[in-house]
């Protein structure tokens, strides 16, 4: 039986590019790091082994190893999606050297 997943923009997770778990289910363009997902609940990246994220996956009742998290190609496109959903866009990246005198 196929489980129906209800989208909640206030509590959803995105795998951006290769940054996410379950890369074995990914298309060729989604390869790379598998250590984090973006959370609309927290407004930031969280580790893919975060307890709340794993509980969210388990609450969906999907087969083991399947995540309902949405794959998206870039942070810029996710920011656009979040704005359209009435959410805050992803925070601007700040260089590690910001505020450091050279």
Image: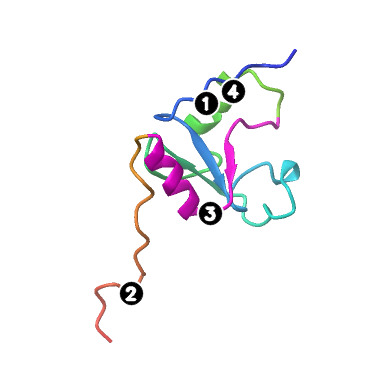
Q: Are marks 1 and 4 in contact (CB under 8 Å)?
A: yes
Would you call the spot at circle 1 few (<14 residues within 10 Å), some (14-19), or many (20 or more)? some
Please give the name of the residue rendered at 41% of the width and 41% of the height, measured from the top-left corner: 82
Q: Which residue is drawn at the image coordinates 38% and 49% (left, top)?
A: 90
Whether the residues at callouts 4 and 2 have beta carbons within 8 Å, the answer is no
Q: Position of residue 40 (x, y in %)?
A: 41, 37
Q: CA distance from mark 2 to mark 1?
A: 35 Å
Tag on residue 56?
1
Horizontally, residue 50 falls left or right of residue 63, namely left
Give the CA distance from mark 3 to mark 4.
26 Å
71 drawn magenta: yes
Location of residue 29 (image quadrant)? bottom right
Between the C-alphas of marks 4 and 2, the distance is: 39 Å
Determine which residue is flagged by label 4: 58
Q: Which residue in the protein does label 3 denote? A: 74
Chain part drawn in magenta: 65-85
Question: Closer to us: mark 3 or mark 2?
Answer: 3
Mark number displayed over residue 97: 2
Q: Earlier in the sequence, mark 3 or mark 2?
A: 3
Q: Secondary structure at mark 1?
A: helix
Query: Where is the N terminus found, in terms of image quarters?
Result: top right
In this orientation, does residue 31 appear?
A: yes
The span from disc 1 to disc 4 (Cα, nearest Å) is 5 Å
10 Å neighbourhood of mark 2: few (<14), some, or many (≥20)?
A: few
Q: Of 76 and 31, which appears nearest the observer? A: 76
């Amino acid at each position: 039986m196929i489980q129906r997943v209800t989208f909640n923009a206030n509590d959803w997770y995105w795998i951006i590019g290769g940054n996410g778990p379950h890369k074995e289910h990914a298309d060729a363009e989604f390869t790379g790091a598998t250590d984090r997902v973006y959370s609309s609940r927290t407004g930031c990246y969280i580790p893919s082994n975060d307890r709340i994220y794993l509980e969210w996956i388990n609450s969906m009742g999907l087969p083991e190893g399947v995540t309902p998290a949405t794959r998206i190609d870039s942070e810029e496109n996710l920011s656009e999606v979040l704005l359209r959903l009435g959410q805050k866009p992803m925070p601007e990246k700040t260089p590690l050297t910001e505020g450091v005198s050279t």
